[in-house]
Every structure is written in structure tokens, then in C-alpha cells.
Image (cartoon, rainbow, N blue to C red):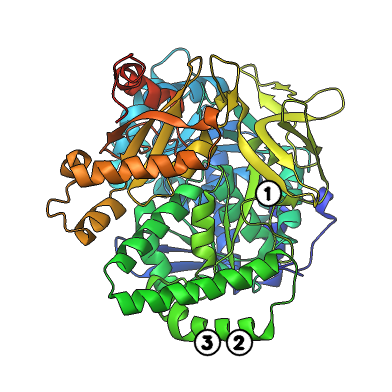
């Protein structure tokens, strides 16, 4: 367990405001929230006492605006103090904050505005206003007012600064304390809209009890220094960052460092040298690709020394994984290699102080997990959904299996249906989906079991191994089921291939779209004497095409006949959230990719279509 801090009540009787009150009383001078004042500027910091005061002032400001207990208030801002503080201010009023992904299209925003029946939205600036202002005149929404964080970009709308000033005039301590103490553990804390990989986002209603129990139970699976820093860079619209960037820090009285630009997180890590770091699989893949690109340019003798140190680290991890004592000779050799080889290199990236690293949201490619294990970094892969308040299963330092997503957290039950779907139930599972009329419809069965839509298996030691999403399983024309993520992760193990999508639903064989890795492919090409390393040139280069053919052949050798890729096409444009192929949490939107490349995919099923 990370924290032994005082809990003001039993965990299942707590609300989030009670934890903030505890932090301000017990740890008033500890840092709570930090952010940069401008690009590359100095850090500004609020202590827990100061943070609670700002929340109280903002609560008065939002109350004056007309925000009422129980109503939804929408937000679209980056990871900035206005977002974090507004979220908690609304919670203290008994309102329900709802963060919308900054990459959402106008039609998605309109859907959420209608569905949530929100009257108010707090947005960042000009970019957001262009998508939100039309909704003020849309008779199908109830939206009345916009509050803008960037005062210079507000136009005729109210500003965060003016709202705060209003709150400063109106704030009364007794009213603030009375308001938050009226909240109950069963009250809605937030509604999180799923990112919509297969359709319109659904509104997942989560209560104070759901979240506090999740935080307490997740905390019991980690060992961190008390009040450790967390770098908050993933969207606060995602349940993972809400847990790690708001709710767990409140439980732990930890220090949140806001990183407004997610592309700048590597620089923040280098500067801050955190003890904990969470990344979705694509983040860990990209970090691994960057390290591999650097290693490829090193002299042979240096690479050999690093590879020897990597082997020692993996051997040590394997003993821990099996629950064995690490042999004295291995432990001593690893300690020397860590000090002389690994730590100096990790320090360059700010990764040398890490004691807890984790991933979730999608199956982690095992080669990426093994890569980081070779640096002494054991990624504690976890699994969960928005509907389960985040984590369902998690690996922990004293019980992990690389490639699995761990064991169930305390108080959560799992069962595997005949078709492999994972069902779960427990106090951290949500009550149900928000309906357009404001009611909540249960998604569980009569016994409380919730169908997660994920496919997996439990091993003899209780570890869960994910296969894929049930809706994403490919059913071939011969009736065989194929998990696309398994095939994709296998072919992506080659450094030339950064992303992959396999297709074959209703067909007799699988085809694939393969995207060249924008970092590793040029490095690989340069190392093999290819002069023009632009991705367009590489995709057509005979040497690259031969190597990709070998990569596909090697992947097929590890897959059964139904899972093998028969034909493929190589693409040069990386898929991302901005272009719509990935969700904001970097999961693949298969239907979008298939629709955009339908001609390529269909062409591979023509009788005379070549294999590559």
C-alpha cells in the first residue's frame, strides 16, 4: 500500500470533498497542483490548503452562474488548472462534471450536449468555441451559457477569471461547508462518455462510492513514496486520467503536475524524473521505438554491453514473475549493470527513478513489455473499463505475469462465459448508463453481472489474459473466430511496422494494412545503407518490401492457419486521433480505418491481387 493517511470515514461512506477537506487539514503545506505558466515557463504550485480555497471560491462562482445540485456541466479543456479546479468545485456543489474529449467532432459534442441535457459548458478558447457556439442556438440542446478559460479569446462569453472574481465576492465558508456535506456516497460524482470506438458515446454514471473504493483498492496494489508526484498528460475525459490525475491524488494527498501538451510529456519526464508513470500501450510503444532508434545508431561494442545488461534485467524479472528468490550471482550482476549501464541511459530520459509503471485500455504487445523489462522497468499491465470505474484487474510487484493483465482487485468478481466473454460484478461497477431523460438504465443482469465485451481467460493462478474485444472478433466465412489484436501485435514486433489492422470478417482469409513506423523505419533503413529515408520512398524500396515480407512470414509462423495474413498493403501515414483512426485514448477505430481504405482492402480479395 502507498498511503497510510487518515481516512475521515470508512471508504464506502466517503465522498471526494471529504478527502479534500482531510488534505487541507492534515497536509495544508504539501504541494497539490502544479502547472507551467506559459510554454517553457516556471512551475506555479498550489498547496492543498490553497487548492481547497480556490475550489471553494469557484464553487461560489458557479453557484452564482446558476449551476444547481445534480445537473451536468460540460467541460472541454486541456490539462490545465482551470479544468482540475472546476471539476472539484462542481463536485462540491453537488453538480456532475462531464469532460468532453478535445478532439471530439461537432456531431459528437452535439450528441453529448443533448444527451446530458447540460445548460453550461466550460471551454478553453477559440478552437473550442467554433464547435460549441452553434449549440447555443440549437433548439435540440438545453445549452445556455459558455464560460471560456482563455479570457483574450472569450469574445462576448463569460470568462473563468470573471467567474472566479464573482466567487471571491460571494464566497462564504459556512455555505461552502454545508453544500459539500450534503453529498452522499451514492450520489453521482461524474459521467464519463466512452470514446465511441463502435458508435455514439455512452454516458457512464459513476458515484462517489464507486470512485473512492476504486482509489482505495488500487492504492493497495502499489508501493510508492507517500505524496508522490503524478504527471497528468492523458485526457481528463478518460477514466484512467481521472483516476490517476484527480481521484487517487485526493486519496494519497499526492502532487499532480499538469502537462497541458501531451506531446511534451517526454520533456516533462526528463525534467521531473518521476517515480510513477502510466501510459496506454501506444505511448509505451512510441517510447520503446524512440529508444530503439537511438540504440541503432550506437557502436557495436556499446550495443553489446547494453544487450548484456538487458538480458540480466529480463532474467531478474523472470525470477520475480515466478515468485522465486533471485540467485545471488544474478542479483549482483544486475546491480552492477543497472548502476553502470542502464541507469545512466535511463537518466537521460528521466526514467531512472521509476518504481511503478503501468498500462491499460488495450492489450499490451508482449515484445514491448519484454523490451522494458530489459531496462529494469516492469510495466504493471492492468485491465478495466469506464463502466468499472477504471481498473478491474492489475498486476502488482508481488504478483505479476508479463503479458497478463493481473488479478482482480479486492471486492471484484470475474467469470468467463462459454464464448470467452468476461463478466464482472462488485462495488466499483457502475449503476448503469445515463439515459436522455436523465434516468439511469442498468446494464447488468439480475445477479449483478456486467458483460464487459472483452474476451479472455483466467489461468490456474487467477491471472487474466486478454484476447480482444468481443465486437472486434473476426468471424471468417468458414466460421472461425480470430482475435485481430493478437495478429496485429505479432506482426508489429518487427521495428519497421508501427501500426497494423487486420481484416477478414466474412472472408476466407485475413488481409492487413501495415503502417511504417515513422521513427524506427528511417533508422532501420539508414543502418542498412538506404539513403532516401522518407516514408514514401521506403514503402516502395525493394529492400524494405523484402524485409516486411519476412516480418509477415515470421509472424505467420507463430500463428495458426486461420490467423495468418495472406495479403497486405503498406501505408506511410501514421494513424492518430486528429485524423480519426485512433480514439483520444489511442485505441484503434477499426471501422474508420476500414472505411477509409475500403478500396485497398477489397482489392486484396480480388483473385489476382498480389500479396504485397
Question: Residue 419's spot in the image, x, y percent?
Answer: 72, 25
Q: Which residue is mark 3?
A: 336
**Callout 2 crowding tier (Cα within 10 Å): few <14, some 14–19, many ≥20:** few
Residue 210, image quadrant: top right
The answer for how far apart the CA atoms under marks 3 and 2 are is 6 Å
Circles 3 and 2 in contact, beta carbons < 8 Å: yes
Q: Is residue 604 left or right of residue 445?
A: left
The answer for how far apart the CA atoms under marks 1 and 2 are is 61 Å
**Mark 2: secondary structure:** helix
Q: Which mark is residue 175?
A: 1
Q: Residue at x 70, y 54 (%)?
A: 215
Q: Which mark is residue 332?
A: 2
Residue 480, image quadrant: top right
Question: Residue 520's spot in the image, x, y percent?
Answer: 30, 54
Q: Is residue 369 left or right of residue 546?
A: right
| Mark 1 or mark 3, earlier in chain | 1
**Mark 1: secondary structure:** helix
- Give the number of the mark in front: 1 or 3: 3
Question: Residue 332's spot in the image, x, y percent?
Answer: 60, 87
Figure quadrant of the N terminus: bottom right
Circles 1 and 3 in contact, beta carbons < 8 Å: no
Residue 193 position (above or below residue 533): above
Residue 516 position (above or below residue 356): above
Residue 218 seen from this side: yes
Amino acid at each position: 500500500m502507498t498511503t497510510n493517511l487518515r481516512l475521515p470515514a470508512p471508504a464506502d461512506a466517503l465522498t471526494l470533498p471529504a478527502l479534500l477537506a482531510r488534505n487541507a487539514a492534515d497536509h495544508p503545506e504539501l504541494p497539490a497542483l502544479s502547472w507551467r505558466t506559459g510554454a517553457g515557463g516556471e512551475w506555479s504550485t498550489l498547496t492543498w490548503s490553497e487548492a481547497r480555497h480556490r475550489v471553494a471560491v469557484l464553487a461560489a462562482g458557479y453557484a452564482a452562474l446558476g449551476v444547481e445540485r445534480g445537473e451536468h456541466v460540460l467541460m472541454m479543456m486541456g490539462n490545465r488548472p482551470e479544468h482540475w479546479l472546476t471539476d472539484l468545485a462542481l463536485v462540491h456543489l453537488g453538480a456532475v462534471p462531464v469532460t468532453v474529449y478535445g478532439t471530439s467532432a461537432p456531431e459528437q459534442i452535439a450528441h453529448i450536449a443533448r444527451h446530458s441535457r447540460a445548460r453550461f459548458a466550460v471551454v478553453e478558447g477559440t478552437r473550442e468555441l467554433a464547435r460549441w457556439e452553434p449549440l447555443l442556438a440549437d433548439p435540440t440542446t438545453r445549452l445556455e451559457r459558455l464560460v471560456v478559460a482563455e479570457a483574450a479569446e472569450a469574445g462576448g462569453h463569460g470568462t473563468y477569471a470573471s467567474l472566479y472574481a464573482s466567487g471571491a465576492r460571494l464566497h462564504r465558508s459556512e455555505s461552502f461547508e454545508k453544500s459539500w456535506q450534503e453529498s452522499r456516497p451514492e450520489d453521482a460524482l461524474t459521467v464519463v462518455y466512452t470514446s465511441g470506438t463502435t458508435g455514439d458515446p455512452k454516458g457512464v454514471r459513476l458515484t462517489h462510492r464507486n470512485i473512492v473504493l476504486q482509489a482505495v483498492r488500487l492504492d493497495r496494489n502499489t508501493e510508492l513514496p507517500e505524496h508522490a508526484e503524478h504527471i497528468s498528460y492523458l485526457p481528463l475525459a478518460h477514466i484512467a486520467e481521472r483516476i490517476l490525475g484527480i481521484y487517487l491524488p485526493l486519496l494519497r494527498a499526492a502532487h499532480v503536475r499538469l502537462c497541458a501538451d501531451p506531446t511534451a510529456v517526454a520533456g516533462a519526464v526528463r525534467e521531473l524524473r518521476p517515480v510513477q508513470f502510466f501510459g496506454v500501450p501506444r505511448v509505451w510503444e512510441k517510447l520503446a521505438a524512440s529508444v530503439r532508434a537511438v540504440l541503432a545508431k550506437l557502436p557495436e561494442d556499446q550495443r553489446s554491453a547494453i544487450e548484456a545488461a538487458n538480458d540480466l534485467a529480463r532474467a531478474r524479472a523472470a525470477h520475480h514473475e515466478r515468485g522465486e528468490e533471485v540467485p545471488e550471482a544474478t542479483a549482483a550482476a544486475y546491480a552492477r549493470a543497472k548502476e553502470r549501464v542502464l541507469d545512466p541511459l535511463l537518466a537521460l530520459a528521466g526514467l531512472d527513478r521509476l518504481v511503478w509503471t503501468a498500462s491499460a485500455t488495450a492489450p499490451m504487445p508482449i515484445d514491448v513489455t519484454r523490451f522494458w523489462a530489459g531496462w529494469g522497468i516492469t510495466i504493471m499491465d492492468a485491465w478495466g473499463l469506464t463502466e468499472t470505474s477504471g481498473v478491474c484487474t492489475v498486476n502488482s510487484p508481488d504478483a505479476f505475469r508479463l503479458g497478463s493483465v493481473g488479478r482482480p482487485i479486492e471486492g471484484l468478481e470475474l467469470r468467463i462465459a462459454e464464448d470467452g466473454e468476461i463478466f464482472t460484478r462488485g462495488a466499483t461497477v457502475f449503476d448503469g448508463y445515463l439515459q436522455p431523460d436523465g434516468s439511469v438504465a442498468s446494464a447488468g443482469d439480475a445477479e449483478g453481472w456486467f458483460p464487459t465485451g472483452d474476451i479472455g481467460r483466467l489461468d490456474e493462478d487467477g491471472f487474466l489474459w486478454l484476447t480482444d474485444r468481443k465486437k472486434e472478433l473476426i468471424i471468417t466465412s468458414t466460421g472461425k473466430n480470430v482475435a485481430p489484436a493478437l495478429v496485429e501485435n505479432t506482426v508489429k514486433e518487427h521495428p519497421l511496422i508501427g501500426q497494423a489492422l487486420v481484416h477478414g470478417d466474412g472472408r476466407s482469409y485475413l488481409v492487413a494494412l501495415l503502417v511504417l513506423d515513422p521513427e524506427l523505419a528511417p533508422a532501420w533503413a539508414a543502418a542498412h545503407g538506404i539513403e532516401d529515408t522518407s516514408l514514401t520512398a521506403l514503402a516502395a524500396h525493394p529492400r524494405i518490401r523484402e524485409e516486411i515480407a519476412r516480418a509477415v512470414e515470421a509472424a505467420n509462423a507463430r500463428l495458426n492457419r486461420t490467423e495468418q495474413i495472406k495479403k497486405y498493403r503498406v501505408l506511410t501515414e501514421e494513424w492518430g486521433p486528429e485524423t480519426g483512426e485512433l480514439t483520444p485514448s489511442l485505441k484503434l477505430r477499426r471501422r474508420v480505418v476500414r472505411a477509409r481504405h475500403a478500396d485497398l482492402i477489397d482489392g486484396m480479395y480480388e483473385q489476382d491481387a498480389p500479396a504485397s
